[in-house]
Image: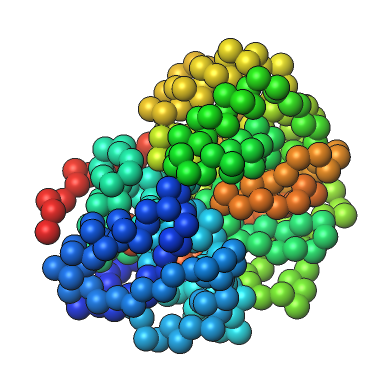
Amino acid sequence: MEPGCPGGRLPRPCRVLVLLNPRGGKGKALQLFRSLVQPLLEEAEVSFKLLLTERQNHARELVCAEELNHWDALVVMSGDGLMHEVVNGLMERPDWETAIRKPLCSLPGGSGNALAASLNYYAGYEQVTNDDLLINCTLLLCRRRLSPMNLLSLRTASGLQVYSVLSLAWGFVADVDLESERYRRLGEIRFTVGTIFRLATLRIYQGQLAYLPVGNAASKMPASPAPAQAQKGPVDTYLVPLEEPVPSHWTVVPEQDFVLVLVLLHTHLSTEMFAAPMGRCEAGGMHLFYVRAGVSRAMLLRLFLAMQKGKHMEYNCPYLVHVPVVAFRLEPKTRRGVFSVDGELMLCEAVQGQVHPNYFRMVCGSTDAPSSWEPQQMPPPEEPL
């Protein structure tokens, strides 16, 4: 898919395959689908086949084997982790270049619904949660508009290749993801509980962070790009092998003690964490946030509370840095801790990644991707069907 291509629309009538995790979030996703989603789909002439996932990576296996030509779109009703499984399953197929073009739709049904919250924001809706967010996202599906989305390609020192649709987190955010799993039945409030517990015993993580800013990407390419290897997927033209130093036109962060590092492709980190109020990423770009060691617990708490309304950047905290980037490299000094990729846990090791612009399409409120880093003026939402 070429950068800047229009998103288009789903046909009317259309057929979709719904992948639903019945144990996601508070365990009520199936009940909510029957009571809230299904009536709207039937009214809008969206026919569906419902598949319930039974275990981790089940959705990945299903989309690897599915005859995609039967469906106009794949609908994922769960948290962000299930969309992660679906996209990585599509990229594992022999026909991955065609498979990743199949339109996708996110319906919030888990405890982490950041992608759905971001799409809700792009559509011009107010920030909402729970049933209201589910209804808004279902209405977007009924209206059928598609928009191109960026895809983050990640490579690790051990040779793992992973694709991300939302985020990579290290440090505080990843710790909260991991440690709040025990509170999953609380829904998204699990992240608030996890944040409070993690603030009580704040950790410092040591590592080397480097990135390629958006402005430096157009004219300078590495002399020896990372090898394509035998793995499927797009070529990472901005990356060199992990055993080599980053190219000279990259920025290397001088500090090596961090509280958190967050790479974010969208605006929200959860339904009530408006992490990137500067707006939707341009084609081929992503948000890089990091918090340097030295920040007080009190300031960190204020930042996270303010993030609910996207006001955290207004503190002008000297420890919090935001940079728009197209590629990054993070090399932890120890294996302490974990990475969280789209809410899914990954072993802590050297990792690098780059954005591939407008690489797949999702149901969204508009058919085009923005092309600047200016905050986006959102149009008013359309009237319900």
Q: Where's residue 375, x and y in %?
A: 38, 36
Query: Residue 32 or 348: which is nearer the viewer?
Result: 32
Q: Residue at x 30, y 69 (%)?
A: 8
Q: Position of residue 185 (x, y in %)?
A: 48, 44
The front one of 187 and 160 is: 187
Q: Which of 327 and 340 is in front in this view?
A: 340
Can you tell which quarter of the image residue 254 is in? top right
Looking at the picture, how far across and down is residue 350, in whole percent? 79, 49
Q: Which residue does the image show at 58% across and 20% down from the upper left?
A: 300
- Vertical arrangement, residue 27 with respect to residue 185, above or below: below
Q: Is residue 233 above or below residue 163?
A: below
Which residue appears at 33% of the width and 40% of the height? 129
Q: How many labels does the image show?
A: 0
Q: Quick one: quadrant of the C terminus?
A: bottom left
Residue 29 seen anywhere in this rendered image of the structure: yes
Drawn side of residue 213 relative to residue 369, left or right:
right
Judged left or right of residue 84, residue 307 is left
At which x and y percent is residue 279? 41, 39
Asked if residue 115 shows in the view, the reply is no
Lateral position of residue 140 relative to residue 19, left or right: left
Q: In which quarter of the image is residue 214?
A: top right
How is the rendered protein coloured? rainbow
Along the horizontal axis of the image, is 299 left or right of 306? right
The residue sitting at 87% across, 54% down in the picture is 243
The vertical placement of 215 against 150, above or below, is: above
Q: Is residue 74 above or below residue 244?
A: below
